[in-house]
Image (cartoon, helix red, strand yellow):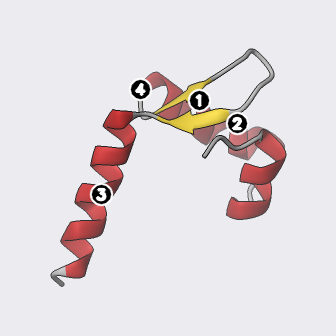
Amino acid sequence: MPRQFSSLSELTGLRGGNLLFHIQKLLDSGMILQRHERGDYMITDKGFKILKSISDMYSVL
């Protein structure tokens, strides 16, 4: 499900530059993509697989 910057800010509690810093890291690593220059952010297959792996690890702890 695509999310806009404002929605991600609400979900994470991060604002402005702090959120942008983390979004840029996720973009650079290929875990998310931006649909348009000022558009929505979406998780990639790579990002989903990594998130699923982390979730699976925590479920066995």
Q: Position of residue 59 (x, y in %)?
A: 24, 79
The amino acid type of the residue labelled 3 equals Lys
Name the residue located 59 percent from the left edge and 29 percent from the top edge: 24
Which residue is labeled 2 in the image? 20
Name the residue located 28 percent from the left edge and 61 percent from the top edge: 54
* Label 4 secondary element: loop
Name the residue located 60 percent from the left edge and 46 percent from the top edge: 1
Tell me: 44 left or right of 36.
left
Q: Earlier in the sequence, mark 2 or mark 4?
A: 2
* Label 1 secondary element: helix
The amino acid type of the residue labelled 1 equals Gln
Q: Which quadrant would residue 61 be assigned to in this image? A: bottom left
Which residue is labeled 1 in the image? 24
Vertical comparison of 14 with 17: above or below: below
Q: CA separation, marks 1 and 2?
A: 6 Å
Q: Earlier in the sequence, mark 4 or mark 1?
A: 1
The amino acid type of the residue labelled 2 equals Leu
Q: Earlier in the sequence, mark 3 or mark 4?
A: 4
Which residue is labeled 3 in the image? 52
Q: Position of residue 44 (x, y in %)?
A: 43, 33
Which residue is labeled 4 in the image? 30
